[in-house]
Image (cartoon, rainbow, N blue to C red):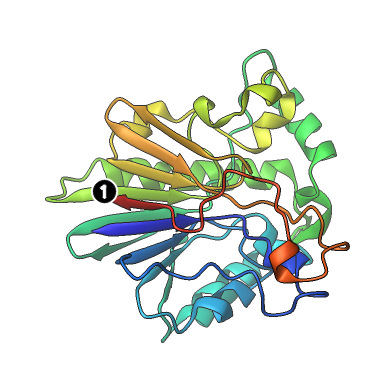
């Protein structure tokens, strides 16, 4: 099976000047397209990929919930995918041609070396727009909501990965699962706590782990598991570009046809 990976397309930033642009097309050789979050606001990412001719594995990122209600949008994403090519995985699994895909947004545990968990939560909550632009049934989305949901997703993944499966397992999350997914320029920054958790005991139980969120490309091994991120990031010249061809994006290493064979 050939799996194509992309994340953090941030199509919402293109809509005003370049409507209906920014979609990454499935490669003709790909069997499955994985979209690891931050594709578009709300359910619009599903609209973009509803009719592609291969299965699409989609996990929500943090930006899918911007300007919206967290719990309601989770339900809306599931409903919007019914009858389309898109499979939204929110603490859920799907098997395709003998490959088990496990998917979750997997918010972080706010544990970073050199900082207490509570200090990292406070610093991250102050720094990230997640905690100003997302609403919940209890009011504004807070670090405590993210932590509680991380713990639910982590427990679910632990249960799934502990089950015997006669095939390959690919985990797809938005947030990063290992400290090696922190770019060296951010080392020591407490706000890493909002991007990556260190889940090495879980990572080594999978064959492949795909994620997004960090806006840098990664491809490394952790005890037999290949961990990968292929995010495009924000457009850096959207207000100056005269055409789609002139657009430039945050991650210069982004590969529109990033394929892995499992």
Label 1 environment density (alpha carbons within 10 Å; few <14, some 14–19, many ≥20): many
Q: Position of residue 12 (x, y in %)?
A: 73, 68
Quadrant in the picture for residue 224: top left
Farthest-out residue, top: 114
Of residues 190 and 135, the one drawn nearer to the viewer in this rendering: 190
Quadrant in the picture for residue 109: top right
Residue at 69% x, 68% y is 41
Residue at 66% x, 71% y is 42
Residue at 40% x, 79% y is 85
Q: Position of residue 18 (x, y in %)?
A: 76, 75
Q: How many numbered marks are there?
A: 1
- Name the residue tied to disc 1: 169
Q: Is residue 75 visible?
A: yes
Q: Position of residue 142 (x, y in %)?
A: 75, 46
**Horizontal side, residue 206 vs residue 91: left or right:** left
Farthest-out residue, right: 239
Q: Is residue 209 above or below residue 135?
A: above
Farthest-out residue, left: 166
Give the quadrant of the N terminus. bottom left
Q: Is residue 207 above or below residue 240?
A: above
Q: Secondary structure at mark 1?
A: strand
Q: Is residue 43 visible?
A: no
**Horizontal side, residue 227 vs residue 70: left or right:** left
Q: Is residue 79 above or below residue 245?
A: below
Q: Position of residue 251 (x, y in %)?
A: 64, 45
Of residues 22 and 112, the one drawn nearer to the viewer in this rendering: 22
């Amino acid at each position: 099976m050939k799996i194509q990976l992309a994340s953090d397309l941030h199509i919402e930033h293109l809509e005003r000047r370049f409507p209906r642009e920014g979609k990454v097309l499935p490669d003709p050789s790909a069997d499955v397209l994985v979209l690891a979050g931050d594709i578009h606001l709300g359910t619009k990412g599903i609209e973009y990929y509803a009719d592609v001719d291969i299965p699409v594995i989609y996990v929500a990122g943090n930006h899918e919930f911007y300007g919206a209600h967290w719990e309601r949008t989770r339900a809306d994403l599931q409903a919007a995918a019914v009858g389309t090519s898109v499979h939204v995985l929110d603490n859920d699994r799907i098997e395709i041609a003998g490959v088990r895909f496990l998917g979750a947004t997997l918010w972080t545990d706010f544990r970073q070396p050199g900082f207490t968990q509570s200090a990292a939560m406070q610093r991250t909550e102050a720094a990230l727009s997640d905690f100003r632009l997302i609403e919940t049934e209890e009011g504004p989305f807070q670090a405590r909501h993210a932590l509680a949901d991380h713990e639910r997703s982590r427990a679910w993944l632990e249960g799934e990965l502990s089950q015997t499966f006669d095939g390959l397992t690919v985990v797809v999350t938005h947030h990063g699962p290992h400290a090696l997914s922190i770019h060296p320029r951010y080392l020591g920054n407490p706000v890493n706590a909002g991007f990556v958790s260190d889940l090495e005991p879980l990572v080594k139980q999978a064959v492949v782990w795909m994620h997004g969120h960090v806006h840098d490309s990664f491809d490394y091994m952790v005890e037999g598991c290949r961990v990968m991120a292929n995010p495009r990031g924000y457009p850096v010249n959207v207000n100056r570009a005269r055409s789609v061809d002139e657009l430039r994006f945050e991650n210069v290493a982004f590969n529109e046809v990033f394929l892995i064979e499992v």
